[in-house]
Image (cartoon, rainbow, N blue to C red):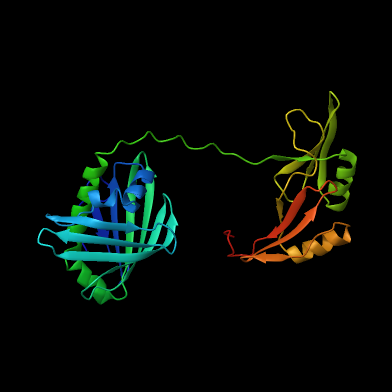
Amino acid sequence: MTTTGEPGRLGVTDFDLPSALEVRIVRTVAAPRALVFDVHTRPEHLPKWMVGPPGWTMPVCEIDLRPGGTFRYVWRSESGEELTITGTFQEVLRPDRLVSTEGWSGGDWPETHNTVTFTERAGRTTITTMIRYPSQQARDAALGSGMQQGLDAGYAGLDAYLATLEIEPALPAAPSMRLELVPVPVADVDVALAFYRDKLGFVLDHDVQPGNGSRVTQLTPPGSACSIVLYKDLPGLDLAPGTLRGLHVVVDDIHKAREVLLARGVDVGGVDDLGGILYAPFSDPDGNTWLLQEIPAGAGRPD
C-alpha cells in the first residue's frame, strides 16, 4: 500500500496495513496533544473541521465522552442527503488515547474497532489511528471507497482549523518527585512508638529532640520508600491526634499479613473485597486509621 507522502512531516498522511484486518493512519499536526485530543472529542470543535466532502456539513454532533458513552455524527449535503456514524467509547484517556467502536448507518458497512493515540514532541502531535475490520474483504472494500482521499481532506480541514485557534504555551515537564514523609499526629509519642515499632514492626529511623520541646520520631514500614513521623505540638503541624484517616500500606498477601499482625497484637478488621482490591482496616492507639491493601495482578495496577 502506498502512502500520500513522507510520514512524520506536517501535511502528510501515512497509510499502511499492519495485518489482514487493519489499516493504520498516521498524521502529524502543529498543535499540542491536549488541544488535538479536544478537537477530536468536543462537539464545539468537530463540526468546524470534520465536514466531509465539499458542500457537506455536520449539523448533528453528539458526544458522551466516557467509557460506555456513545457518539453520533450526522453529515448533510446541500441536496439533503445524510450520512450517519455512531459508536461507543470503550476507553477514554485524555490526552493520550481513545478506543471506540464505529459504524455507518445504512448500507453494508460493518462495525469497526478504532484506537487513536496522540503523542507529542516539540509542540507537534502525531495522531495514530488503528482501524480493525471484521474481515479483510470489509477492509479492502473501505480502502476502495475513497477512504484515503477522504481522510486526507479531513486532515487538511483539521490543519486549517487548528491554525485558527490560539495555542497556549506548553507547560514545562513536572520535576521528578517522591513521597518521602507522612506526619502522624499523636497524643503520646512513646505510646505511639511502642505501637508502630513493637507491634506493627516499623523500623525506627531516628528519634531526636531538636529543641524548643519538639521531638521528631521517624519510622519506615518494612519495604517502603516512604516514612512516617510521629509528632506532638510540632510547629506548622496542627492536626489533632487521631484525625488522620485512611493511610494505605500495600502487602503481597493480605490474609497472611493480617494473621501476622493479629499475632503481634494489632487489632486488624476483616478483609473486604472492593472491586477486586482487598482491604483490611486497623487503627493506632490515638485513632489514626490505616488500611492494609492488596492489589491482585490485573486488578488495577500493572505488575
The residue furthest top is 212
x 44%, y 35%: residue: 171
Q: Is residue 34 left or right of residue 163?
A: right
Q: Quadrant of the C terminus?
A: bottom right
x 43%, y 51%: residue: 94
How many tags in the picture?
Answer: 0
- Which percent across, then down, holds residue 181? 71, 39
Quarter occupied by residue 133: bottom left
Q: Is residue 86 above or below residue 242?
A: below
- Report whether residue 188 is seen: yes
Quarter occupied by residue 296: bottom right
Q: Is residue 172 above or below residue 117?
A: above
Q: Is residue 110 left or right of residue 223?
A: left
- Which percent across, then down, holds residue 257? 78, 61
Q: Quadrant of the N terminus?
A: bottom left
The front one of 126 and 278 is 278
- Which percent across, then down, holds residue 131? 32, 65
Q: Is residue 12 left or right of residue 172?
A: left
Q: Is residue 62 left or right of residue 94?
A: left
x 51%, y 37%: residue: 174
- Report whether residue 8 is seen: no
- Which percent across, then down, holds residue 142? 22, 69
